[in-house]
Image (tube, rainbow, N blue to C red):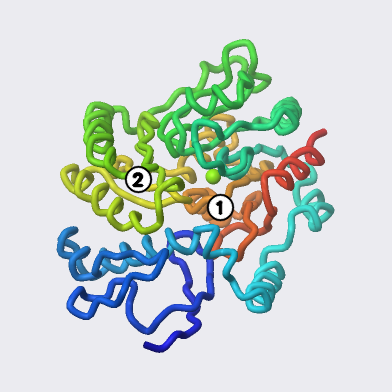
Amino acid sequence: MVNQNVVVPDATTGIITVSTVSNSSVFTPSAQKPPTAPGHISISKKKLLKSLEINGDQSQRLNSWVDSMRASSPTHLKSLPSTSSEEELNSWMKRHPSALDMFERIIEASRGKEIVMFLDYDGTLSPIVADPDRAFISSKMRRTVKKLAKCFPTSIVTGRCIDKVYSFVKLAELYYAGSHGMDIKGPTKGFSRYNKDKPSVLYQPAGDFLPMIDEAFKQLVEKTKSTPGAKVENNKFCLSVHFRCVDEKKWSELALKVRSVVKNYPTLKLSQGRKVFEIRPMIKWDKGKALEFLLESLGFDNSSDVFPIYIGDDRTDEDAFKLLQERGQGLGLLVTKFPKDTNASYSLQDPLEASTYTNIRTC
Ligand SMILES: [Mg+2]
């Protein structure tokens, strides 16, 4: 068996990793199965795909999921050869410079235009933590967002349900687009400085799916309870199966369990975020559509005098970055420490930099 360095472009998270692997597949057929290396996934590819009854594009997708699950693991990230990752990062940073370094240029581009802020929550306003119920926003970040909302219409756009994210953020003056934009709510009456004469925004494009999502939630809880560390979260219009506390050896087994539930619901789709599987209605709605809806609600649908700024760290935020690119308006900022394929123009390293950036953006 020959060990070699391979470049793994991760289709799901966009992370490019270089790691040393053996020349046998991670999913080596059981007949030639080598001893399982620590951290490797023990199920065979053939068996996995057979159980999932998927092939072609879908099997490629599953492979890329499992690759990205592994690539986003801190242990794998730490094992990146430093020279290679540094070169990769430098070249990526030339294409997506730090928003902090480009501040003057951004100010110039937004001059004379109404800024509208859109902020993802996990990984952008709060750090990614082991327990998703403890992804608290810091007091400093809350003060910054509060200040921001005094100057510009400000929305939180998140995969979480509104109630959950509100319990963290606790700011009544914000717009909230929860469940990946499928549950949109305006500021609490009396708190909005915008559209005072209009009724508060409320939009739920997937309202009919609620009973089905609740049923799938119960099945996922039942199915995954035997996987230590797995946590199923009901985000109202979206279900999240977190695997950040699951042993890496159990990841593909968990993927199989999740898939076996989701395949009973042909109108629900399964995707992967940062250490999380997400299950949501198969409707043409995403964070980009939510951004478009909110701009329209604020009266900017046909306006050229608007400058939307969207800050996010996840693959699901790419829909919003893409929309801004297509509209040729505003800009997307990706929060990341690693090179990723992205439609965002600029980058920020972490929630601290996002806080610094939003702080200096306030009037
Ligand atoms: Mg996020």
Relative to 150, residue 241 above or below = below
Q: Residue 171: name its quadrant.
A: top right
For disc 2, the neighbor class at 10 Å (few under 14, some 14 to 19, many from 20) is: few
For disc 1, the neighbor class at 10 Å (few under 14, some 14 to 19, many from 20) is: many
What residue is shown at x 31% (from left), y 58% (from top)? 252
Residue found at the far top of this picture: 190
Classify the position of the C terminus by image quarter: top right
Residue 236 position within the rendered picture, expressed as x and y whole percent measured from the top left:
36, 29
Q: Residue 31: name its quadrant.
A: bottom left
Inspect the image, locate mark 1, and give the three-letter code of the amino acid beneath it. Answer: Phe
Residue 337 position within the rendered picture, expressed as x and y whole percent measured from the top left:
65, 58
What residue is shown at x 52% (from left), y 50% (from top)? 314
Relative to 84, residue 122 above or below = above
Tell which quarter ligand 1 is in.
top right
Residue on which disc 2 sits: 284
Q: Is residue 299 left or right of residue 262?
A: right
Residue on which disc 1 sits: 321
Q: Residue 261: name its quadrant.
A: top left
Instruction: Determine the secondary structure under disc 2.
Output: loop
Q: Is residue 241 left or right of residue 56?
A: right
Residue found at the far front of this picture: 35
Q: Is residue 143 left or right of residue 121?
A: right
Q: Is residue 299 left or right of residue 28?
A: right
Residue 333 position within the rendered picture, expressed as x and y whole percent measured from the top left:
65, 52
Instruction: Determine the secondary structure under disc 1.
Output: helix
Residue found at the far bottom of this picture: 2
Inspect the image, locate mark 2, and give the three-letter code of the amino acid beneath it. Answer: Lys
Mark 1 or mark 2: whose residue is earlier in sequence: 2
Q: CA distance from mark 1 to mark 2?
A: 16 Å
Classify the position of the N terminus by image quarter: bottom left
What residue is shown at x 29% (from left), y 47% (from top)? 269
Residue contact between numbered discs 1 and 2, judged by CB atoms under 8 Å: no
